[in-house]
Image: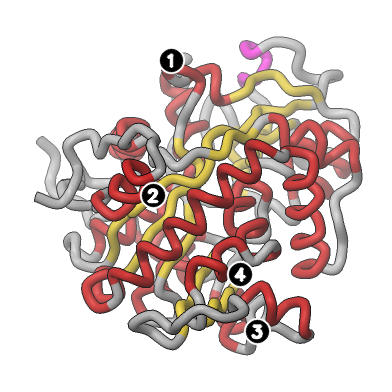
Amino acid sequence: MSAPRTTLRRSIAAAAALPLLAVALTACGYGSDSKDDDAKKANVSAGGKKLSADTVKIGYFPNLTHATALVGIQEGIIAKELGATEVKPSTFNAGPSEIEALNAGSIDIGFIGPSPSINGFTKSKGKSLRIIGGSASGGVKLVVNPEKIKTLDDLKGKKIATPQLGNTQDVAFLNWVSEKGWKVDAQSGKGDVSVVRTDNKVTPDAYKSGSIDGAWAPEPTASKLVAQGAKVLLDESTLWPDNKFVITNIIVSQKFLDQHPDVVEAVLRGSVNTNKWINANPDEAKASANAALKTLSGKELPADVIDPAWKSIQFTDDPLAATLDAEAQHAVKAGLLDEPDLTGIYDLKPLNKILKAAGKPEVADAGLGVK
């Protein structure tokens, strides 16, 4: 066995420090405090009594794969379960900054991808967070320039973007490249395929300029490229059993879970009810998510982007724990993560209590739950 590495390579730690602007923006109230009566209604339910905390601070991304949070907060579904306990939302552009905020107490609960969840848990030696529920599956595609790439084998020698070194899509693409038998240095991105780490906001312009030939990207970035003429070459869901893999789950700081279990349960009930409403009313939910994105970013997504993007995402209460474990092993294989001990990363007891009360099947933790 090779000499132990740090939990993540130094460059990953450096990458985690880059999105400080997002933390600064959220600390200043960007995408957080309500600014008018309608927003206030979404944050505090009319009537109802206050739970054990005055407020609950919830973090998420302004992305369609975080639509449970977008819609749940926009429609007041989460606030309804919290009574007079106020929701204070904050938005982030990347997982590392959201983990920093959780560790600092700037948020209590977060909607976030599997890789930062794993990283946050392992770097804290299992003391910072728990995954308490699922939110979304799918919504990741390999999209390419059809004039340069017509088959998967044509990727060799091309420049393919991923959002960030060591992030969920980066790890997935590196694993796919490895399965093809190709070699890529994970740190530099150089090899049989050039992996170009590019912020999702920049990826469409990079594609348009020709500086990348395609991207392994989450929605709605993938559909933005398709609207520019790119073609979907591979949907990542086809690589997973039952076409399901975790793209967004729900985490909570262990301190907040210990001190305010009633608030955590209320947020989870709100999440379960939101997913139920989304799945029962997909068109209304899509419109609600788009309205939330417009509020946060000042711009809604056009139909040729949001329609295909929305169809590729499944909203689920199941955290799909076995797929998170597999993703951790992909990161180990790529040399980005030491062999982790993920025992205790899940605490699904509150969620399963809610699901059982609703007459729904309980979900599994793949042997990685709190003992």
Q: Which mark is residue 91?
A: 4
Instruction: Give, as a three-letter code, the residue at label 3.
Output: Asp
The Cα atoms of the two marked residues, 2 and 1, are separated by 35 Å
Instruction: Give, as a three-letter code, the residue at label 1.
Output: Gly
Q: Is residue 52 among the parts visible in the rendering?
A: yes
Image coordinates for residue 159, horizontal then vertical, percent: 67, 33
User: What residue is at 66 percent from the left and 53 percent from the top?
Assistant: 63
Q: Which mark is residue 181?
A: 1
Q: Quadrant of residue 327?
A: top left
Secondary structure found at label 1: loop
Numbered range of the magenta stretch: 152-156
Q: Quadrant of residue 77?
A: bottom right
Q: Nearer the viewer, mark 2 or mark 4?
A: 2
The Cα atoms of the two marked residues, 2 and 3, are separated by 25 Å
Image coordinates for residue 41, horizontal then vertical, percent: 69, 77
Q: Nearer the viewer, mark 3 or mark 4?
A: 3
Tag 2 residue: 133
In the picture, measured across the screen, residue 200 lies left or right of residue 183, that is right
